[in-house]
Image (cartoon, coloured by chain):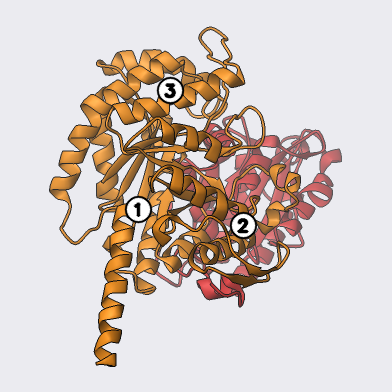
Chain colours: A orange, B red
């Protein structure tokens, strides 16, 4: 099972002292957090993509390329890549290029984006959100798998004899997750392709998340990719930890009460009860995360949101120490002990390359038998 | 005609009766306790149940006021509010009663309407009613409530019931003009419910649109 973190890349004032990081500071903080993820033995760092303040990560492959050069093991991913407003041709090229630089340590999570004004800035209409996600991904899927593509669709100019360049590393396209919180169509899309499905459950009650994941698993089996419990599932999570849970609550409360994403609605207590937010000791985070497996089945990727609500970088790095030292090693062990052998790991470049060469060896053996 | 027990306040818990029994949800946006809005709601429910074998669940929006604000901010309902939304979706009929504030339904009432999942009230029989500080506000039911429910594609019965202070005090009796309007509106609601099958609530997670349909003939 893979464990990692994701960052939205928001510039949020620290409510305890009013400090607002500059964009430069925030961008460098994201780099420091990604490097810390590798240092602490985490598997994945995923960056958000936004094109409006107060968010900084408008250029994910620039960021991930830089992190790739400074890390050795970390898988570089996105949370999410806007499949609606980005040109699928550019996504195909940018991420294939990143794959080469990162020696395959790349996957992506597709998302539609929920910020209405962003769509027209890129010549699109939010009312076409699902249709854009479907058409653009269908094209992206082909661009990575077919050398020469003739294509026409509704949302971009047609392509004639087009070759996306560079070709994916070793001819193996990056693994793709589809992220959606409440659109059954996206769970259906992920199932159709046999891609991963990521539910960013951080603001949602368990019952809702469960229904989306059950739908994806059922349809994954329907489309013949394996049994429902072999479908590739990822989940979010958000935590704030201190050795003593009372200290964690005391320190995090002003952040919770004032953050744009949390504040002025449910109380911290209601929110931690109704959503996966866990504010407490490392053991409480372990216990809470183990319940995800009970609710949603054995799953492949757990991404935590750690740099939220305007927490200063120093605090986030302390949180990552605890996550890497005390939480993730226990979760790895306990999740692995409970997982049946037939449940696969999340695909990586190495596993996909091995599967592709096994498939091509099998087909050349079959054709030489026919020839003999 | 009105035995006292029939106007007793409704029990607040929803129980699933046998299949033939119909269900009503009675939403009241009154703020004070006791509230004349709730009193009107109870009388409408009792009058409807005299004509229709139905369970009724009373929902006081006052009790869900925080949940409603939280739902607007977080995008998901707290467990108790979710149960209420679910009860509305599965109900055979809805009785909706709001105080009139500044010539329209109250903000709390509108917040509730705003968190109803899309399509919840489509083809659902609805009785609209209101209370107000003066009878001069009575047409707010026609210029504010009725268009709101028309927008939601509900089937709003022709008689809307407005109760002014003179309907409760000033020598008014339980057999006065308000009672006659309540009876007429309840009869209309009962007829609309009876001519319909119980609602079927579609579940997008049970029957996803197949991907071939989403693709609309595109190649993959």
Extreme residue toward the left, this view: A337
Task: Kindly indicate the quadrant of the structure image that contains residue B127.
Answer: bottom right
For disc 3, the marked residue is: A32
Number of the label disc, if any, that sits on residue A349: 1
As measured in the structure, the alpha-carbon distance from the residue carrying label 2 to the one carrying label 3 is 31 Å
Q: Position of residue A81 (x, y in %)?
A: 54, 46
Camera-side residue of A214 and A41: A41
Residue ID at (77%, 37%): B166
Report in which chain the residue with disc 1 lies: A
Mark 2 residue element: helix
Give the vertical position of B210 relative to B28 (above or below).
below
Q: Earlier in the sequence, mark 2 or mark 1?
A: 2
Residue B2 visible at all:
no
Chain letter of disc 3? Answer: A
* Image x and y of residue B20, in percent: 45, 72
Mark closer to the chain start, 3 or 1:
3
Alpha-carbon distance for marks 2 and 1? 21 Å
Depth check, front residue: A58 or B89: A58
Based on the displayed image, in which of its 4 quarters is residue B37 positioned?
A: top right
Q: Earlier in the sequence, mark 2 or mark 3?
A: 3
Asked if the residue under mark 1 is in contact with the one under mark 2, i.e. CB atoms within 8 Å, the reply is: no
Q: Nearer the viewer, residue B197 or A35?
A: A35
Q: Secondary structure at mark 1?
A: helix
* Dot 3 and dot 1 within a common chain: yes
Label 2 sits on residue: A89
Q: Residue furthest right?
A: B136
Tag shown at residue A164: none
């Amino acid at each position: 099972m893979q464990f990692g973190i994701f960052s939205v890349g928001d510039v949020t004032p620290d409510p305890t002292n009013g400090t607002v990081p500059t964009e430069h500071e925030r961008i460098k903080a994201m780099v420091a957090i990604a490097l810390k993820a590798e240092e602490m033995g985490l598997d994945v760092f995923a960056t958000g993509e936004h094109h409006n303040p107060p968010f900084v990560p408008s250029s994910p492959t620039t960021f991930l390329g830089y992190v790739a050069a400074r890390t050795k093991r970390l898988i570089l991913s996105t949370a999410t890549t806007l499949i609606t407003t980005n040109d699928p041709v550019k996504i195909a090229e940018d991420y294939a290029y990143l794959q080469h630089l990162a020696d395959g340590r790349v996957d992506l999570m597709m998302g539609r984006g929920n910020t209405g004004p962003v769509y027209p800035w890129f010549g699109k209409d939010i009312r076409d959100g699902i249709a854009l996600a479907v058409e653009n991904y269908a094209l992206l899927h082909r661009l990575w798998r077919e050398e020469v593509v003739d294509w026409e669709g509704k949302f971009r100019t047609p392509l004639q004899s087009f070759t996306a360049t560079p070709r994916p590393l070793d001819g193996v396209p990056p693994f793709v997750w589809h992220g959606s919180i409440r659109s059954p169509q996206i769970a259906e899309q992920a199932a159709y392709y046999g891609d991963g499905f990521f539910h960013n459950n951080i603001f949602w009650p368990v019952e809702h998340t469960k229904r989306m994941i059950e739908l994806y698993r059922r349809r994954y089996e329907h489309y013949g990719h394996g049994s429902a419990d072999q479908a590739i599932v990822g989940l979010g999570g958000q935590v704030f930890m201190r050795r003593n849970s009372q200290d964690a609550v005391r320190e995090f409360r002003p952040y919770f009460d004032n953050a744009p994403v949390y504040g002025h609605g449910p109380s911290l207590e209601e929110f931690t009860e109704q959503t996966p937010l866990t504010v407490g000791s490392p053991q409480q985070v372990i216990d809470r995360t183990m319940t995800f497996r009970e609710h949603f089945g054995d799953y492949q990727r757990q991404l935590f949101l750690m740099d939220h609500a305007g927490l200063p970088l120093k605090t986030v790095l302390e949180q990552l120490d605890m996550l890497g030292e005390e939480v993730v090693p226990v979760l790895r062990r306990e999740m692995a002990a409970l997982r049946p052998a037939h449940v696969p790991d999340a695909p990586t470049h190495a596993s996909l390359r091995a599967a592709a060469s096994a498939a091509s060896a099998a087909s050349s053996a079959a054709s030489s038998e026919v020839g003999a | 005609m009105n035995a006292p027990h029939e106007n007793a306040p409704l029990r607040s818990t929803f129980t699933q009766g046998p299949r033939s029994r119909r269900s009503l949800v009675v939403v009241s946006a009154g703020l004070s306790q006791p509230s004349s809005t709730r009193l009107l709601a109870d009388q409408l429910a009792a009058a409807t149940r005299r004509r229709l074998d139905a369970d009724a669940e009373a929902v006081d929006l006052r009790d869900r006021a925080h949940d409603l604000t939280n739902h607007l901010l977080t995008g998901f309902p707290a467990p108790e509010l979710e149960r209420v939304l679910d009860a509305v979706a599965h109900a055979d009929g809805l009785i909706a009663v709001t105080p009139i504030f500044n010539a329209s339904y109250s903000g709390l009432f509108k917040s509730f309407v705003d968190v109803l999942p899309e399509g919840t009230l489509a083809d659902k029989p609805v009785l609209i009613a209101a209370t107000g500080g003066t009878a001069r506000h009575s047409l707010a039911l026609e210029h504010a409530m009725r268009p709101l429910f028309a927008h939601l594609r509900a089937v709003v019965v022709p008689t809307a019931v407005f109760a002014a202070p003179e309907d409760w005090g000033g020598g008014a009796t339980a057999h006065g003009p308000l009672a006659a309007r309540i009876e007429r509106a309840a009869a209309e609601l009962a007829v609309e419910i009876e001519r319909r099958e119980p609602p079927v609530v579609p579940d997008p997670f049970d029957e996803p649109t197949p991907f071939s349909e989403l693709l609309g003939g595109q190649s993959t």
